[in-house]
Image (tube, grey):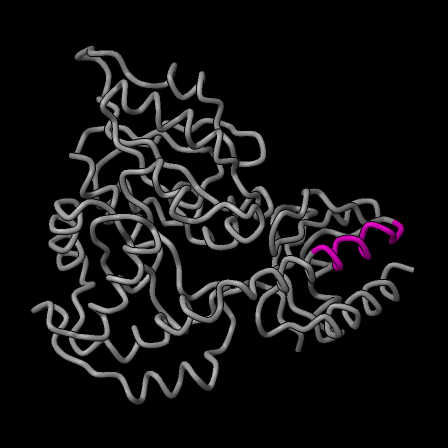
């Protein structure tokens, strides 16, 4: 099978497996695991933040941010199709007791004027605005790299209103490679940021959340409350170190393969690529070909290709470390035969 469902399906490299085997470990709840401490220090340095914390998943990292920044009864502003709102099981309501105030964006970007207008007034009838959440790259917009200018404008108004900003940067390194802007510069316009080690960077598990030392101190208690306090977890942090040190620059290959896939699909009758391919995600509409997304996916599966639905007639393909350029060419050949 050629698996283009997600970059989460990548397998750890032999170097990552060896690093896990050799990892020096200690009790992370006691803050004594040397490999995790090394990973957290490296991540904080790369993002230009005071401190960082290793967490089991990006969803937990995002939830820790909301829980740390907010109190129950507040409201958070976020894009209408953001991961926190769309894919995290209403955890912001279930755990933090906050409600979302969604803004429909353009290619994942919220209009700063709309963000400003969405901040609640001091009124007993309304919740207080506790947090603004951004996402970069933006998954449901097709891996769009949200512009630094958009982030800067929203951060500037957040300072005026004394409201913190959290960045769901699950694929932030993809944005950095696509634009040439250092992740540290993106992170400068946030109070906290989460990024995944287990997507394009290829580590088997884990994410990192970073911010001020005080934010991370408070976040550690929320990690414990959520069951994320781990023990000799250096075994799973060691591959993350390899990922940060060796797997960032090669994301450009995934982006090139996604562009190759998009270019080929766009030439096929009945298929329409819906997104500008900035990074490693391609969204294809199958309506004109006469198929629903689920029908098309089943046809692909029979041909040895895996993808996921992204709407009634939209299919998502995601390139990653375990898919080669040659395999993309094979996929294009298979799809071409299906739609003819």
Residue at 58 percent across and 42 percent down: it is 141
In this view, the residue in front, 250 or 232, is: 250
Q: Residue furthest left?
A: 30
Residue at 58 percent across and 35 percent down: it is 107
Q: Position of residue 209 (x, y in %)?
A: 28, 53
Q: Quadrant of the N terminus?
A: bottom right
Q: Position of residue 59 (x, y in %)?
A: 34, 54
Residue at 59 percent across and 74 percent down: it is 322
Decide if residue 318 is on the left or right side of residue 90.
Answer: right
- All told, the count of numbered labels is 0
In this view, the residue in front, 276 or 179, is: 179
Main secondary structure type of the part rendered in magenta: helix
Residue at 34 percent across and 21 percent down: it is 157
- Residue 331, placed above or below residue 294: below
Q: Quadrant of the C terminus?
A: bottom right
Decide if residue 288 is on the left or right side of residue 133.
Answer: right
What span is in magenta? Answer: 259-269
Q: Position of residue 175 (x, y in %)?
A: 52, 48
Is 252 contained in the magenta span? no
In this view, the residue in front, 258 or 78, is: 258
- Residue 300, placed above or below residue 62: below
Q: Position of residue 177 (x, y in %)?
A: 54, 53
In this view, the residue in front, 201 or 288, is: 201
Q: Residue furthest right?
A: 340
């Amino acid at each position: 099978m050629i698996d283009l469902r997600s970059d989460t399906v990548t397998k750890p490299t032999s170097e990552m497996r060896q690093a896990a085997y050799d990892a020096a470990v200690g009790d992370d709840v006691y803050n004594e695991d040397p490999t995790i401490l090394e990973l957290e220090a490296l991540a904080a340095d790369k993002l230009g933040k005071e401190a960082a914390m290793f967490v089991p998943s990006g969803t937990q990292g995002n939830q820790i941010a909301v829980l740390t920044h907010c109190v129950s009864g507040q409201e958070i502003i976020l894009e209408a199709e953001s991961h926190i709102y769309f894919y995290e099981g209403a955890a912001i309501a279930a755990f933090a007791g906050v409600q979302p105030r969604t803004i429909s964006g353009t290619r994942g970007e919220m209009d700063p004027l709309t963000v400003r207008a969405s901040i609640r007034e001091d009124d007993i009838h309304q919740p207080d605005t506790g947090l603004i959440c951004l996402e970069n790259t933006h998954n449901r917009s097709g891996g769009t790299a949200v512009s630094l200018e958009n982030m800067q404008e929203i951060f500037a108004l957040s300072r005026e209103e004394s409201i913190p900003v959290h960045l769901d940067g699950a694929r932030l390194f993809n944005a950095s490679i696509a634009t040439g802007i250092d992740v540290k510069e993106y992170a400068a316009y946030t109070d906290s940021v989460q990024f995944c080690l287990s997507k394009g960077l290829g580590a088997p598990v884990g994410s990192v959340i970073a911010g001020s030392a005080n934010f991370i101190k408070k976040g550690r208690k929320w990690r414990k409350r959520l069951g994320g306090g781990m023990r000799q977890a250096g075994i799973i942090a060691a591959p993350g170190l390899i990922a940060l040190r060796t797997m960032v620059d090669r994301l450009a290959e995934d982006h090139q393969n996604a562009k190759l896939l998009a270019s080929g699909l766009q030439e096929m009758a009945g298929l329409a690529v819906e997104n500008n391919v900035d990074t490693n995600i391609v969204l294809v509409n199958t309506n004109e070909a006469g198929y629903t997304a689920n029908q098309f996916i089943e046809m692909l599966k029979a041909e040895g290709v895996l993808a996921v639905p992204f709407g009634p007639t939209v299919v998502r393909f995601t390139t990653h470390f375990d898919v080669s350029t040659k395999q993309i060419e094979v996929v294009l050949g298979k799809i071409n035969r299906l739609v003819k």
